[in-house]
Amino acid sequence: MIKLQEEDFSVQAEYDKLRETSSVGALVTFTGLVRDMNQGKTVTSLQLEHYPGMTEKSLAKIVEEAKSRWHITDCTVIHRVGELTLSDQIIFVGVASVHRHDAFAACEFIMDYLKTEAPFWKKESTADKQSYWLDARESDLTALNKWRK
Amino acid sequence: MIKVLFFAQLRDQLATSELHLPSAENHDIETLLKNLKARDKNWQRALSASTVLVAVNQTMCNDNRVLQSGDEVAFFPPVTGG
């Protein structure tokens, strides 16, 4: 399941949905949060923009690719958009599988691809009342390249 | 006609989120970019960044991509979600 939404989500509720299937023996979840410091600046809030239509397509393609590489029983990706404040949840990725290796690898794969291919953009507001668009990180591309070997 | 969209800082720099341009004068991405850059110095500068990404009909592509009437083209900076 892939969802884009402004409202918050419950990790417990999503986790419980993923463990409903009795063949699931491993469940890996990742949650991304708004943190207070980025690129040396004190962050107070975050605005998340996306490209409606392409975002859904792009996330579906990433999940399909993960399913073709690992045995995945079920998978949930939730990405929030709009205005967020400190410690808010931004993203949830949950992967359920029979054994842990598939769940760990697929969860990391989905995050690494999402970071470089899904059309989301963050604009941060800082303590000095400035706001600026985040630059992409070189380390995200490095993380992606390890799956391309 | 071709629909052209701009996102994030690129939209801010250009003060434009959407354009509708005739397909006859923009037969591929390379030509479309050339025409957009010719608008003024600001467009020239913003669209010359090597990091600008392009998608046609919501799938990323390169500058050789041929355009047809009804296509949706989007220009945007590197993504920063997650």
Image (cartoon, coloured by chain):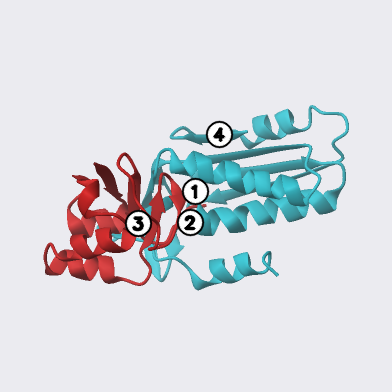
* Depicted A126 relative to depicted A32: above or below: below
The chain containing the residue under callout 1 comes to A
Looking at the rendered structure, the secondary structure element under dot 3 is strand
Looking at the rendered structure, the secondary structure element under dot 4 is loop
- Residue at 61%, 48% (x, y): give it: A62
Pointer 2 local density, CA inside 10 Å: few below 14, some 14–19, many at least 20:
some
Describe residue B41's horizontal placement relative to residue B76 as left or right.
left
Looking at the rendered structure, the secondary structure element under dot 1 is loop
| Disc 2 with disc 4 on a shared chain | yes
Q: Find the distance from the CA under tag 1 to the CA under tag 2.
A: 6 Å
Residue A33's tag is none
Q: Position of residue B40 (x, y in %)?
A: 11, 65
Q: Which chain is cyan?
A: A
**Is the C-beta separation of discs 1 and 3 under 8 Å?**
no
**Is the C-beta separation of discs 1 and 2 under 8 Å?**
yes
* Depicted A148 relative to depicted B80: above or below: below
Q: Position of residue B58 (x, y in %)?
A: 43, 45
Disc 3: which residue: B76
Q: Is residue A94 visible?
A: yes
Q: Nearer the viewer, residue A82 or A143?
A: A143
